Image (spheres, rainbow, N blue to C red):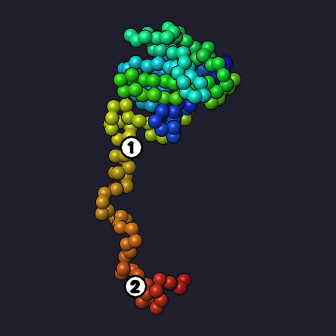
Amino acid sequence: MAVLKFRIYFEEDDSVYRDVAVKHTQSFLQLHQVILKAYEFDSKHQATFYRSNDNWQRGREISLEKYDKEYKAPPLLMEETTIGSEIKIPNQKFIYTYDFVKGWAFMVELINVSKEENAKLDYPAVVRTEGIAPSQYGTKGLVGDKLAEMEEKYDLTAGAEGFGEEGESDDSEDSEMEEETGEEGTEEI
């Protein structure tokens, strides 16, 4: 059974991405769920995929449900559509939008196809995480927690030990060194 690996980029910062592995027989609903899990988003909002091309233009829609909007062609439904059925080219791309009010957009790109399943993985699975994910509801959540941990660990408060103005030096150490060596700034070892 083919295993497809997708890289899901956050649209506003391509250095933030998640790699997920799914079986080609799994549905877009399962892909949608693993993307939300990978970015630590809840599942309370509308979502849709668009088949795309190398220029990231939106094509056929694969939607969570049929929404009250005008469609050029009726959307495929995530629950009924297998991922393998929509792979048309070796580096197939999709655009994934979540929460139409906030407009979260992710670029989904097929990066690998493997015939071998990993027995240790429960598909679909998040297999790589790169960068700090955006917070779904503002500054709370992952980003806030990580920054708070860093401030506590390194005590980044103004005037703390080790922080000074650029070019500032401790004059007492320099004068002691001059007395010991008789030279300015050099010391014999």
Q: Give the quarter of the image for residue 116.
A: top right
Image: 79 above or below 156: above
Residue 124, percent from left and from top: 54, 23
Answer with left or right where residue 168 lies relative to residue 115. left
Answer with left or right where residue 110 lies relative to residue 159. right
Residue 4, percent from left and from top: 62, 24
Q: What residue type is labelled 2?
A: Glu
The quadrant the N terminus occupies is: top right
Q: Can residue 117 be seen in this view?
A: no
C-alpha gap between disc 2 and disc 1: 42 Å
Judging from the image, what secondary structure is the residue with disc 1 in?
helix
Residue to which mark 2 is pinned: 176
Q: Can residue 9 be seen in this view?
A: yes
Q: Earlier in the sequence, mark 2 or mark 1?
A: 1
Q: Which amino acid does label 1 sit on?
A: Lys
Q: Which of 72 and 13 is in front in this view?
A: 72
Question: Residue at image x 34%, y 56%?
Answer: 156
Judging from the image, what secondary structure is the residue with disc 2 in?
helix
Q: Residue pushed farthest bottom?
A: 182
Residue to which mark 1 is pinned: 146
Q: Which of 68 and 150 is in front in this view?
A: 68
Q: Nearer the viewer, residue 54 or 123?
A: 54
Image: 17 above or below 65: below
Question: Residue at image x 51%, y 9%?
Answer: 73
